[in-house]
Amino acid sequence: MKQLVWSLPLAFLLACGAGTGSSGSDNGEGGSGGEGGNDPGPSSSSTSSSSTSSSSSSTSSGPSGLTEMDRLQVFCEKTMLAGCPAWFSSTAQCVDIMSKTQTDLCQDKWVAETDCLGKTQAGDWTCNGAGEPEVVGTICRDEYGFGSYCRITVATPACYGAACMYDSDCSGESKCNEATEHCVESSAQCGGLPCKYNADCPSAFKCNDALGQCVLP
């Protein structure tokens, strides 16, 4: 799911960030792996800072009491491996881009993911052939990617478009996602997008009931 879901959305976010002072660079990959996997993935977004942004970056959340900035630092420092540039070119760029994806829709999974990643050590990570950071073995298998990819998809216009109640509220090939109450394009790459039913996901994805997120079948 990785290569399908993360690169297109993230590339969009990087392009938008480049225009506002963040350095644009590579894309990343990701995607939620499905029932037992990790990674979901996403897309970009200039669209919805208004619709996705909620909690203050200084607010503590989760059992660990970390602030949003703490969580961004954990995610970016842990995934920024030497010689592993597929997602971001620096920790600072990662923090800048990911700070624009904050949303209550993904908060529980983001908290679980960053709480788990904070416990990992250098030896728990490796860089795959595509230049993506991966966790070795089963540590954080059920947390890694599900929160971060969810945030990126919800920050992507193709995955989180206009507000809607019915499919008729959406234009073109888009349909109304009942979990987010926003339009999603049928051909979009939206791994990790919140969902209730298969119909809430783009045509290449299905809704994983246990996760409540769109994954590749």
Image (cartoon, rainbow, N blue to C red):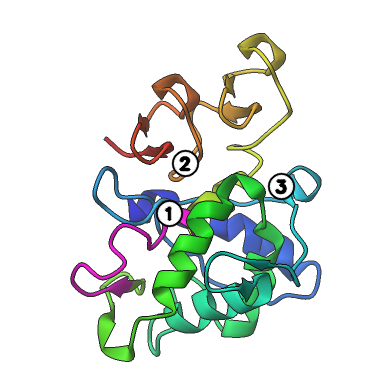
Image location (x, y in percent) of residue 155: 65, 49
Mostly what secondary structure, the magenta segment?
A: loop
Query: Residue 31 in the image: x percent, y percent?
Result: 39, 52
Quarter of the rendering occupied by the C terminus? top left
The reply to whether the C-beta atoms of the residues labelled 1 and 2 are less than 8 Å apart is: no
Q: Label 1's element?
A: helix
Q: Which residue is mark 2?
A: 189
Residue 100 vertical placement versus 9 (above, below): below
Q: Earlier in the sequence, mark 1 or mark 2?
A: 1
Q: How many angstroms separate mark 3 from mark 1 (CA)?
A: 16 Å
The answer to whether mark 3 and mark 1 are in CB contact below 8 A is no
Residue at 37% across / 60% down in the picture? 143
Q: Nearer the viewer, residue 154 or 129?
A: 154
What label does residue 52 carry, if any?
3
> Three-letter amino acid code at disc 1?
Phe
Considering only order in the chain, which callout, 1 or 3, is on the residue closer to the N terminus?
A: 3
> Disc 3 marks which amino acid?
Thr
Q: Is residue 144 magenta?
A: yes
Residue 215 within the magenta-colored segment of the rendering: no
| Residue 100: x %, y % from top left | 71, 61
Q: Specify the segment rendered in magenta.
A: 134-147
The reply to whether residue 94 is in sight is: no
Label 2 environment density (alpha carbons within 10 Å; few <14, some 14–19, many ≥20): many
Residue at the disc numbered 1 = 146
